[in-house]
Image: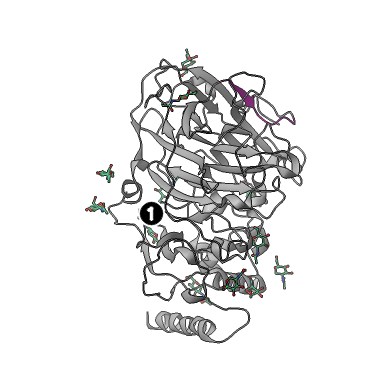
Amino acid sequence: MASKLTSALRLCFFFLALWILPSDAFQPRTLSQLPPVGGVVSALPLLLNTSLPINNVTALLASFPANLTGNLTGLLLPNATELAKIQQYVLNVTRPTVASFIDGTNTTIDCVPIQAQLSLINATLTNQTLPLTPPVGPRLNTTTVTSAVPVLNGTIPRIITPAANATALLNRTGLNATCPNGSVPVPRLTVADIARFGSLQAFLNSALNKGPPPNVTAPSSASDGHEYATTSPDRSSSDTPPAFYGMQTSMSVWAPFVDQPVGSREFSLSQVWVTGGTGIALQTIEAGWQVDTVAYGDAKPHLFIFSTRKGYTDPVCYAGRKDCPQGAATFVQVSNSVYPTITLDSSVANGDTVQYTLLVVRDSPTGNWWVKLGSEWVGYYPGNLYTSLAQSADSVALGGEIVDYARLPGAPPGTPHTKTDMGSGEFAAGRSPATVAYHYNMMYVDEDNNLQTLDGIQVVNTNPAGYDPDCYSGQLVSSTTGSEIFFFGGPGFSAVCAI
Ligand SMILES: *[C@@H]1O[C@H](CO)[C@@H](O)[C@H](O)[C@H]1NC(C)=O
Ligand SMILES: *[C@@H]1O[C@H](CO)[C@@H](O)[C@H](O)[C@H]1NC(C)=O
Ligand SMILES: *[C@@H]1O[C@H](CO)[C@@H](O)[C@H](O)[C@H]1NC(C)=O
Ligand SMILES: *[C@@H]1O[C@H](CO)[C@@H](O)[C@H](O)[C@H]1NC(C)=O
Ligand SMILES: *[C@@H]1O[C@H](CO)[C@@H](O)[C@H](O)[C@H]1NC(C)=O
Ligand SMILES: *[C@@H]1O[C@H](CO)[C@@H](O)[C@H](O)[C@H]1NC(C)=O
Ligand SMILES: *[C@@H]1O[C@H](CO)[C@@H](O)[C@H](O)[C@H]1NC(C)=O
Ligand SMILES: *[C@@H]1O[C@H](CO)[C@@H](O)[C@H](O)[C@H]1NC(C)=O
Ligand SMILES: *[C@@H]1O[C@H](CO)[C@@H](O)[C@H](O)[C@H]1NC(C)=O
Ligand SMILES: *[C@@H]1O[C@H](CO)[C@@H](O)[C@H](O)[C@H]1NC(C)=O
Ligand SMILES: *[C@@H]1O[C@H](CO)[C@@H](O)[C@H](O)[C@H]1NC(C)=O
Ligand SMILES: *[C@@H]1O[C@H](CO)[C@@H](O)[C@H](O)[C@H]1NC(C)=O
């Protein structure tokens, strides 16, 4: 006990020394050096972030969640040089903190002053006045038919919406978990978070595996290995509006199995894409839930928010995700309770169906693209960073996406199709919200800030490159209330989905 304490103290002094010694490699900023933003941030005492990086590979391994899915035995652990680099990176990006707490999902959260968040220390956003008050949300057009429950095949599940407000979402284990006003929740980055990627570079490249919506051709090869079951407007339909100012959906949340073969990065997600332009000019705002065991360190669904401004060829990242490199961070967090990457509750087959309402919307006075989960405005992408999405979006898409390692360059020939589940792991044909993942009450925002039912949509099953359509499926079904439901998903590898 005593010797442990001594070595912990020694480590402590080492990093304290790193912290206070003048060094080109590590220059923490003070609040007064931070760029101004709109709104008032109350003066709060800054605490020294006491999370110490670890430099012990045994301890590192022990810190990984014991029950990560997939095969992690072949993980390439960082060597000593790499570990030192990782430690330096952690020190570089660690932000000033006004408070810390452990949230309802056992995540250590640091409360970072709004203007000290990673996206706002980039020169692109420095000195801009950025709004910190949520926009006026779109109105529900009275002619729009909505229903809280998709009434369909079989038993109607109990639909629960845990994100009805932020307190409910964060207080799942009875913890009072919000950040002080003027600060935003940031999950604490540790050396172990990076080490499980094998190297700093692999960690920083992590977002490169995001794929475009399947009906849009992007110039990158990012779509290799990606499979989809989505729905999107049929351009030839007279119901398709010329422009979109946002998209709202009520989506069920599941915790699909995601395989993680050595050397791969698979994920499974359900999301909304809001897109403008094509090719290199393609710009997107994306949000939904995602399971990615390596990125999040667990097998649970997490809220994700993502954007590209150059057809997936720019340095992009998932907003607020620990692997988001400083130069790529552009999402401005505003909520002091709901943060990008927050763990979401998930549905139980034939039990409770967990449904969250998600909205991506352009705020017309500022042009900023906001994301709202349940009743909480999470934050926004500054509108002036966009060209194709500067005025409005051309299209939208909703549905599921997975990555299949077998289709990625470098996978050994003959590698079978991944067993990664999409949605709940059940095919769309089940048509029951109690067992199959869905998007429902799909409504776009028109130019007058009205929510309108999205009609004239078609199903886009899997990648246009021609992947086996029997691995995952999507189906549009009319509900008894008139609003369409999109069911999607599948189990991946099976007799009809082998290669
Ligand atoms: C590394 O960590 C493990 C587990 O915490 C501990 O047993 C071991 O003594 C540590 N080794 C060193 C060199 O500190
Ligand atoms: C993984 O661990 C978590 C927390 O300890 C537990 O709730 C969950 O049931 C475990 N999952 C599996 C598949 O063992
Ligand atoms: C896990 O991966 C290692 C290294 O690639 C391999 O040797 C081992 O057989 C795999 N284990 C399982 C259970 O697939
Ligand atoms: C340590 O790992 C890094 C990254 O994987 C590699 O580039 C480097 O050559 C390794 N150094 C040694 C001494 O093995
Ligand atoms: C840490 O920051 C310094 C100064 O900006 C930079 O030179 C160095 O490359 C960074 N190190 C890492 C590992 O990110
Ligand atoms: C919370 O996390 C800590 C540290 O990772 C772990 O020791 C503890 O068992 C976790 N608690 C729960 C309830 O999962
Ligand atoms: C921001 O404003 C400060 C003070 O006016 C100025 O010194 C600095 O150069 C500006 N930074 C940028 C990137 O414009
Ligand atoms: C609803 O949308 C229609 C156009 O689809 C529009 O004519 C009508 O004024 C809107 N109603 C409200 C209350 O905004
Ligand atoms: C938030 O949700 C909880 C649990 O559902 C409820 O008790 C509480 O009244 C809600 N608070 C507000 C402000 O809506
Ligand atoms: C969180 O939940 C606990 C127990 O359920 C309750 O006592 C507490 O007031 C809640 N905190 C907030 C901020 O709602
Ligand atoms: C700032 O962000 C832009 C756009 O994401 C990026 O190109 C640039 O490299 C970043 N600069 C720094 C210093 O991080
Ligand atoms: C209802 O669901 C079952 C499977 O759960 C499926 O076989 C059947 O085709 C569905 N019926 C309709 C009308 O969708």
Few, some or many C-alpha atoms within 10 Å of disc 1 (few <14, some 14-19, many ≥20)?
many
| Residue lying at 58% horizontally and 65% vertically, measured from the top left | 126
| Rendered view: 23 above or below 216 | below
- Magenta span contains residue 133: no
Residue type pointed to by label 1: Ser
| Rendered view: 207 above or below 115 | above
Q: Position of residue 80 (x, y in %)?
A: 64, 73
Q: Which residues are magenta?
A: 456-465
Between 458 and 262, the residue placed more toward the observer is 458
| Residue lying at 75% horizontally and 44% vertically, measured from the top left | 280
| Residue lying at 58% horizontally and 61% vertically, measured from the top left | 125
The C terminus - image quarter: top right
- Magenta span contains residue 459: yes
| Rendered view: 96 above or below 334 | below
Q: Position of residue 434 (x, y in %)?
A: 41, 26
Q: Quadrant of residue 191?
A: bottom right
Callout 1: helix, strand or loop? loop
Name the residue beneath numbered marker 1: 337
